[in-house]
Image: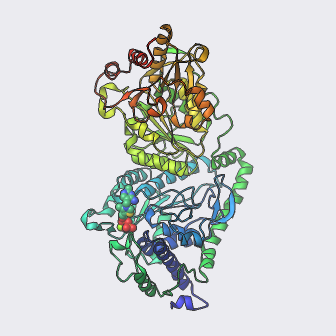
């Protein structure tokens, strides 16, 4: 039996080893019990995680949402047992969706025994909002590290905005661990490049250099000089040649703490499946249980009782409690007393921090929102959006964002005096410049939202494809990231089919939990933002037109506040008894209204339903939905300059969809509207075809 387990009094070095081997064996046993999972990387990185958590990180297990805690991101999310072990052994406490502590541990030993099983708090990959103490969901490789850049930007911005002389209320650091896969994915280099440009010296990535991925050695696909790459980006690059040497790991982390002006990249040479006599350094250790016999041999190699399972030896909990427990509690208590002095001196700022932590908005957050007068020429969705953004950003101090090099075009630049640019030497700026890096823009926006800011990221709608994985994760994480997309359809006609979104609305509508909104005029843009800003646990996509859209006369038509219901009757037949319903979103709203007026003149009783958001509409009562789309009115026409996919749900089998079944084309908008049938005459003739002959 392991000397350290047999003895009563252990040296600190022996206790370190005992804790590390506990992480390793919990991981091995959990994967074995689940009959699936990834044991090898936890076995290799247990010393690293132990060092970060128990020796370095400022994290209070009793209060895992303390605002100034250091952040830990496990970007190689398949190694989730590292995190479940750490959260369990540190006795990290659970919090609920209202950010209250609920007096239960975040991850129990029973959860670990039930690793990867339904309802276990030890799921296959780290899941934010499902398990307290997880700072971001990871699993799609590259995303964790790329999200950590958003967290580091958030800390810089919070410090610049809220710290005062003698009151460093924000001074936390962000630690992220990644493997070969993360560094091969394109999103990580995008984010790494920006992190260096922004001089994020509060950010440290540790690279698990084990030279193994699923298909075998990295020699088959990944042979570049990774260190040289990070040096070229402008990172501080360090190397620790032995993943078991916790003193060297701690030393490297201390070097990171002292580094100014650059993020730190630590290359850690490791052996996947460390300790397993037959599987170490092989891809077999990556993603399958070791097997019962190999588990025994490995435990023997660690000096562990071979038959013990899920063993947490005496002294382990206590050693974590004396390390991270004591250090975290002290740091948190010191911060709390600093913050109460800060509150006394700067009550307004402290109040903002409180509100932000609960994802609430300051009083008057929607004051001065524009009201657009009726105007047949109208306003482009993007222009209306720009006006709204500039008001919101002044009303909500922590509302900020930017674009992937398209600010002047999608009108997302904050232009009011004092808005400023976020740069290394101006970290209080509210305009983020993501560069042409849409994917990492998505992850960074998520990192900012996870840090409780209200961020937006923007580009053309067509390029939403580039950040779709981040939008999906925002939805999975239930965080209020806002994604703003202009040029929502064929409005940029001459740019042609490469720039004309077709399937994008359908594909985003398919993401569970995501709110998509395509407003039909300038006042609907205002109402769309009003809705989105009140979301606390859902991300949103806003799709805005490039071209001017007529601003509807709201004295004649129903008020735009109907946007808050997802769909509403904007113009109706006499006596509110329509024989046909026209449903439209975005630029097609005015088209539908135009057709409606002409139909009325011909004695055809049509109703126009503005439907900027399917998801919001779906969340209304059946009664409301039936009032907007009465089941007995089966003659229905949907008009949307996008894929017809999915509209059947609203027009039924007897209705008709005027939409796109092909890609667009390069031509002026008017010609495209004609070619693809987005003209009132087309709507009218479709209606006439649908209605029984009188
Ligand atoms: C974007 C993405 N592509 C593919 C996968 C599937 N996958 C999970 S782990 C892995 C290999 C990762 O290798 P590495 O990062 O070196 O991890 P190690 O095995 O060394 O822990 C792959 C391809 C994934 N999770 N995410
Ligand atoms: Mg690897």
| 495 relative position to 62: left or right | left
| Residue in the foreground of this view, choosing between 167 and 454 | 454
* Label total for image: 0
Q: Is residue 216 above or below residue 577?
A: below
User: Which residue does the image show at 49% across and 31% down from the upper left?
Assistant: 650
Pick the front one: 239 or 625: 625
In the rendering, at what x and y percent does residue 114 appear? 54, 69
Location of ligand 1 given as a quarter of the image: bottom left
**Identity of the residue drawn at 59% across and 67% down:** 107
Quadrant of the rendered image containing residue 43: bottom left
Give the residue at x 51% y 76%: 26
Residue that extends furthest to the right in the rendered view of this protein? 344
The residue lying toward the viewer, choosing from 397 and 1, is 1
User: At 51% from the left edge and 11% from the top edge, which residue is drawn?
Assistant: 600
Q: Is residue 358 left or right of residue 433?
A: right
Figure check: 638 above or below 303: above
Q: Quadrant of residue 535?
A: top right
353 horizontally vs 386: left or right? right
User: Is residue 255 visible to the viewer in this orientation of the structure?
Assistant: yes
In terms of image quadrants, where is residue 283?
bottom left
* Residue 64 coordinates in the image, percent (x, y): 62, 61
Q: Colour scheme of this structure image?
A: rainbow
Locate residue 10, reporting x and y percent.
Answer: 58, 88
User: x%, y% of residue 331?
Assistant: 64, 65
Residue most extreme to the left:
220
6 shown above or below 614: below
Query: Can residue 234 be seen at all in this image of the molecule?
Result: no
């Amino acid at each position: 039996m392991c000397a350290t387990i047999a003895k009563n009094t252990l040296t600190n070095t022996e206790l370190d080893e005992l804790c590390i081997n506990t992480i390793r064996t919990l991981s091995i046993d959990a994967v074995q019990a689940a009959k699936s999972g990834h044991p090898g990387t936890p076995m290799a990185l247990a010393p690293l995680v132990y060092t970060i958590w128990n020796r370095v990180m400022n994290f209070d297990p009793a209060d895992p949402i303390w605002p100034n805690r250091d952040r830990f991101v496990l970007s190689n999310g398949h190694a989730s047992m590292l995190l479940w072990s750490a959260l369990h052994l540190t006795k990290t406490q659970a919090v609920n969706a209202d950010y209250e502590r609920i007096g239960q541990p975040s991850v129990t030993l029973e959860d670990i025994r039930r690793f990867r099983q339904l309802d276990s708090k030890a799921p296959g990959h780290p899941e934010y909002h499902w398990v307290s103490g997880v700072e971001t969901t990871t699993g799609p490789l590259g995303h964790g590290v790329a999200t950590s850049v958003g967290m580091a930007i958030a800390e810089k911005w919070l410090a610049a905005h809220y710290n005062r002389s003698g009151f460093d209320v924000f001074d936390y650091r962000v630690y992220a661990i990644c493997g070969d896969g993360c560094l091969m994915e394109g999103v990580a280099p995008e984010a790494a490049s920006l992190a260096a440009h922004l001089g994020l010296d509060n950010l440290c990535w540790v690279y698990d250099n084990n030279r193994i991925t699923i298909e075998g050695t990295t020699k088959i696909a990944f042979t570049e000089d990774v260190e040289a790459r990070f040096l070229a980006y402008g990172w501080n690059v360090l190397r620790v040649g032995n993943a078991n040497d916790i003193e060297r790991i701690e030393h490297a982390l201390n070097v990171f703490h002292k580094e100014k002006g650059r993020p730190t990249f630590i290359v850690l040479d490791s052996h996947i499946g460390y300790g397993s006599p037959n599987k170490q350094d092989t891809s077999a250790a990556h993603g399958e249980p070791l097997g019962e016999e190999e588990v025994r041999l490995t435990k023997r190699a660690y000096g562990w009782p071979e038959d013990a399972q899920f063993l947490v030896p005496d002294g382990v909990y206590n050693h974590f409690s004396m390390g991270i427990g004591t250090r975290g509690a002290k740091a948190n208590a010191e911060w709390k007393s600093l913050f109460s002095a800060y509150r006394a001196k700067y009550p307004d700022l402290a109040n903002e921090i409180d509100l932000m932590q609960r994802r609430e908005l300051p009083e008057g957050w929607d004051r001065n929102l524009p009201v657009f007068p009726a105007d047949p020429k109208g306003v482009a969705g993007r222009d209306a959006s720009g006006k709204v953004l500039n008001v919101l950003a002044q009303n909500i101090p922590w509302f900020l964002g930017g674009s992937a090099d398209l600010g002047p075009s999608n009108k997302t630049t904050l232009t009011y005096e004092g808005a400023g640019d976020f740069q290394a030497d101006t970290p209080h700026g509210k305009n983020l410049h993501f560069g042409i890096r849409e994917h990492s823009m998505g992850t960074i926006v998520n990192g900012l939202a996870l840090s409780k800011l209200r961020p937006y990221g923007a580009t053309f709608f067509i390029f939403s494809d580039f950040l779709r994985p981040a939008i999906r994760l925002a939805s999975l994480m239930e965080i209020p990231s806002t994604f703003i997309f202009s040029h929502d359809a064929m409005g940029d006609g001459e740019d042609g089919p490469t720039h004309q979104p077709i399937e994008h609305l359908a594909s985003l509508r398919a993401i569970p939990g995501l709110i998509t909104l395509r407003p039909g005029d300038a006042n609907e843009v205002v109402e769309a933002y009003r809705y989105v800003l009140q979301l606390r646990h859902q991300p949103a996509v806003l799709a805005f037109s490039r071209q001017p859209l007529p601003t509807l006369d709201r004295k004649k038509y129903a008020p735009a506040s109907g946007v808050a219901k997802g769909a509403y009757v904007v113009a109706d037949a006499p006596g509110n008894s329509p024989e046909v319903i026209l449903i439209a979103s975005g630029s097609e709203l005015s088209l539908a209204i135009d057709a409606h007026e002409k139909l009325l003149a011909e004695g055809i009783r049509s109703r126009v339903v503005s439907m900027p958001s399917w998801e919001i509409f779906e969340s209304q009562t059946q009664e409301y939905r039936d009032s907007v789309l009465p089941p007995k009115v089966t003659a229905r026409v949907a008009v949307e300059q996008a894929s017809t996919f999915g509209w059947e749900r609203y027009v039924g089998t007897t209705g008709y969809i005027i939409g796109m079944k092909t890609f667009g084309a390069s031509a002026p908008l008017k010609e495209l509207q004609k070619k693809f049938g987005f003209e009132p005459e087309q709507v009218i003739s479709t209606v006439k075809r649908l209605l029984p002959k009188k």
